[in-house]
C-alpha cells in the first residue's frame, strides 16, 4: 500500500484538466458500427474547449526558522572542519546574518476547471485551490478573471468557484456516470504542465476504483492521457457531457502511463450543488462504526457468502440506535440499494438527504430484519468520533494471576482491577482479557493481541475464560468452521471471525 501511495500522483500543484459540453443530446458512448467511418473528436473538442478554463493560484509560503542547532532541510552542508563550516551555520542554522527569519515567498500553481453555469460557476479540485490567497480563472481567449471560493470539500476533493463576468460564459453539464460502461470512449481537456487547451482521448478502463484517497472513493479509471496540470478538469463522454473530474494518476515517474482516475459525476454533482448553495456539504449520518464482512464472519452468522457492512459499534442516541440497529447487525441493503461490500455504505449514507427516513435491511441471527431509520447530519465532530480515538499502548507483561485458560493460541483471564490498570483497560469495559497470544497462532493471524478484551462470543456476552472456551467447543461440535467474537481495544469494538478447527 505504501508503494501505491508513492505512485499515486495527485495532481495538486499541476494544472487540472477541464472540458466544456455542447449539446443536450443523450449520451451514447458507442464505437461506430464495423465499416463505418470514424467521426473523430475534432467537432466534439471544438464545442467543448470554450467551457474549459485554466486556474492559477498564488499563496504566501513562510519558511520556518530552524531551531538552535538544526539545519534547514534545503541547506548545503560544508565538510567537517572546513573553514566555511561556521559561515554555513551562520546562514542556514540561524536564518542569516543577524539571526533574521527567512523571508516569506510567493508560490503559484496551475490547474484546470470547467464552467457549469453561464453566470460564472466553475468546478475544480479542492487540492488545486488549496489554501490559496488569490485565485484566477483564465478563459480560452486568455481573459483573466478573479475568482472567489464558494466552498470546497476535501473528502471528495471538489471545489466550486465564482467569477464575475460581463457576459455569459460557455458552459457544460453533468452526464450520468452510472451509465458509463467499461470500454466507452471518453475525452479529457485540460492544462497539462501549463500548456493549456490540451485534448486527449481514451476509454473507460475500469469503474469503482478505490485508491485510498478518501472515504468515498469510487473513481472511474481511464487511459486518456492525464498529466500534472490536468487536475480539476472534466472527463467527457461522446455526447459532450461531464462524466468525471480528473483527479489523480498512477505513475512511478510522475507522467502519464495510461492510468488516470476521475471522480464520477454521480458522486460529484450533489456535492457541487451543496457547495454552490451552502458553501459546505450536508451529508447523511447513520451513527455506526462498520467493518468488513470476512468469509469467517459470514460463515459464523449463517450467511451463504460474505457481503454487506458489519456494525461494530452504534453511536449512543444516534439515528441507528434510535431505529433499533445493534452491534453485530450486517447492513445488506440501504434505501433500496444493495450493499455489496463495506465501503459502499458510507457513500450511500452520505449521498442521502439529511432528514430522510430510509429502509435499512440488516442480517441478524440468521434472518433479515427491515428497519426505518431517520438520517441525521454528519458533523465534523461526529465524523471524527466515528473514526475512533486510537491511543498508544505498550505491550504489557503477562500477569501471574489469576490462572489463564488457553484457547486457540491465546491465554485468557477474567478482568480484575489489577489487570485493568496493568493493561490500560477502561473501567466500563466488560469481558475476558487476552493476556498472551502465541506467535503464529490462529489468534495472532486474526490480529488479536495482548490487552484486547473479548466482549462477546457467538453474539453472547462473556465474563469468564471458561465461557469463551465453551462457545468454541460448541462451534466445533456443531461442525462450524469459525466463531464470531467481539473484541474491544482502546475503547473501540470490532468483530473477528475466528477459525475454531484445531491445527494438527
Image: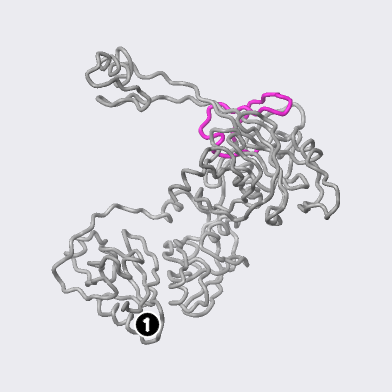
Q: Which residue is mark 1?
A: 475
- Looking at the image, is 488 positioned above or below residue 29? below
Q: Position of residue 311 (x, y in %)?
A: 45, 66
Residue lying at the far right of the rendered structure: 36
Residue lying at the far front of the rendered structure: 35
Residue lying at the far bottom of the rendered structure: 477
Report the number of discs. Answer: 1
Image quarter where the C terminus lies is bottom left
Residue 402 falls within the magenta-colored stretch: no
Colour basis: one colour
Q: Position of residue 361 (x, y in %)?
A: 56, 71
Give left or right: position of 187 versus 90.
Answer: right
Residue sitting at 60 percent across and 57 percent down? 352
Q: Position of residue 337 (x, y in %)?
A: 62, 65
Report crowding for label 1: few under 14, some 14 to 19, many 20 or more residues within 10 A (C-alpha): some
User: SS of the residue at dot 1?
Assistant: helix
Place residue 373 in its image quadrant: bottom right
Front one among 337 and 257: 257
Residue sitting at 53 percent across and 38 percent down? 254
Residue sitting at 51 percent across and 68 percent down? 323
Q: Position of residue 268 (x, y in %)?
A: 63, 48
Front one among 260 and 366: 260
Residue 142 falls within the magenta-colored stretch: yes
- Looking at the image, is 117 positioned above or below residue 422? above
Magenta highlight range: 123-149
Amino acid at each position: 500500500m505504501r508503494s501505491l501511495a508513492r505512485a499515486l500522483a495527485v495532481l495538486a500543484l499541476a494544472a487540472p484538466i477541464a472540458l466544456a459540453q455542447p449539446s443536450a443530446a443523450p449520451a451514447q458512448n458507442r464505437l461506430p458500427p464495423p465499416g463505418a467511418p470514424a467521426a473523430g473528436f475534432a467537432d466534439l473538442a471544438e464545442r467543448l474547449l470554450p467551457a474549459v478554463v485554466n486556474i492559477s493560484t498564488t499563496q504566501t509560503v513562510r519558511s520556518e526558522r530552524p531551531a538552535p542547532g538544526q539545519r534547514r532541510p534545503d541547506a548545503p552542508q560544508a565538510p567537517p572542519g572546513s573553514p566555511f563550516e561556521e559561515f554555513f551555520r551562520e546562514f542556514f542554522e540561524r536564518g542569516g546574518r543577524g539571526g533574521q527569519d527567512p523571508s516569506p515567498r510567493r508560490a503559484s500553481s496551475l490547474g484546470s476547471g470547467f464552467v457549469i453555469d453561464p453566470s460564472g460557476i466553475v468546478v475544480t479540485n479542492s487540492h488545486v485551490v488549496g489554501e490559496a490567497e488569490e485565485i484566477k480563472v483564465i478563459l480560452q481567449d486568455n481573459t483573466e478573471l478573479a475568482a472567489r471560493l464558494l466552498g470546497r470539500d476535501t473528502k471528495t476533493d471538489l471545489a466550486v468557484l465564482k467569477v464575475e463576468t460581463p457576459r455569459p460564459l460557455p458552459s457544460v453539464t453533468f452526464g450520468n456516470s452510472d451509465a458509463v460502461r467499461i470500454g466507452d470512449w471518453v475525452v479529457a481537456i485540460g492544462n497539462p504542465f501549463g500548456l493549456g487547451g490540451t485534448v486527449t482521448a481514451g476509454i473507460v478502463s475500469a469503474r469503482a476504483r478505490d485508491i485510498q484517497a478518501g472515504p468515498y472513493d469510487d473513481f472511474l479509471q481511464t487511459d486518456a492521457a492525464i498529466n500534472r496540470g490536468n487536475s480539476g478538469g472534466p472527463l467527457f463522454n461522446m455526447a459532450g457531457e461531464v462524466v468525471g473530474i480528473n483527479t489523480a494518476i498512477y505513475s512511478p515517474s510522475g507522467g502519464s502511463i495510461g492510468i488516470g482516475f476521475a471522480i464520477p459525476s454521480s458522486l460529484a454533482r450533489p456535492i457541487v450543488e451543496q457547495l454552490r448553495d451552502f458553501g459546505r456539504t450536508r451529508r447523511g449520518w447513520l451513527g455506526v462504526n462498520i467493518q468488513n464482512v470476512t468469509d469467517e464472519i459470514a460463515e459464523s452468522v449463517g450467511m451463504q457468502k460474505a457481503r454487506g457492512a458489519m456494525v461494530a459499534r452504534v453511536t449512543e442516541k444516534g439515528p441507528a440506535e434510535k431505529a433499533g440497529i445493534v452491534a453485530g447487525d450486517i447492513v445488506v441493503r440501504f434505501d433500496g440499494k444493495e450493499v455489496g461490500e463495506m465501503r459502499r455504505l458510507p457513500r450511500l449514507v452520505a449521498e442521502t438527504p439529511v432528514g430522510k427516513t430510509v429502509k435499512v435491511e440488516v442480517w441478524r441471527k440468521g434472518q433479515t430484519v427491515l428497519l426505518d431509520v431517520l438520517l441525521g447530519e454528519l458533523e465534523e465532530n461526529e465524523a471524527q468520533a466515528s473514526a475512533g480515538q486510537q491511543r498508544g499502548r505498550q505491550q504489557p507483561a503477562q500477569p501471574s494471576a489469576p490462572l489463564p485458560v488457553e484457547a486457540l493460541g491465546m491465554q485468557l483471564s477474567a478482568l480484575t482491577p489489577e489487570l485493568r490498570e496493568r493493561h490500560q483497560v477502561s473501567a466500563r469495559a466488560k469481558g475476558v482479557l487476552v493476556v498472551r497470544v502465541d506467535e503464529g497462532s490462529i489468534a495472532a493471524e486474526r490480529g488479536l493481541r495482548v490487552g484486547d478484551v473479548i466482549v462477546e462470543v457467538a453474539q453472547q456476552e462473556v465474563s469468564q475464560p471458561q465461557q469463551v472456551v465453551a462457545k468454541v467447543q460448541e462451534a466445533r461440535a456443531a461442525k462450524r468452521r469459525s466463531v464470531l467474537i467481539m473484541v474491544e481495544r482502546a475503547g473501540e469494538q470490532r468483530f473477528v471471525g475466528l477459525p475454531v478447527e484445531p491445527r494438527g
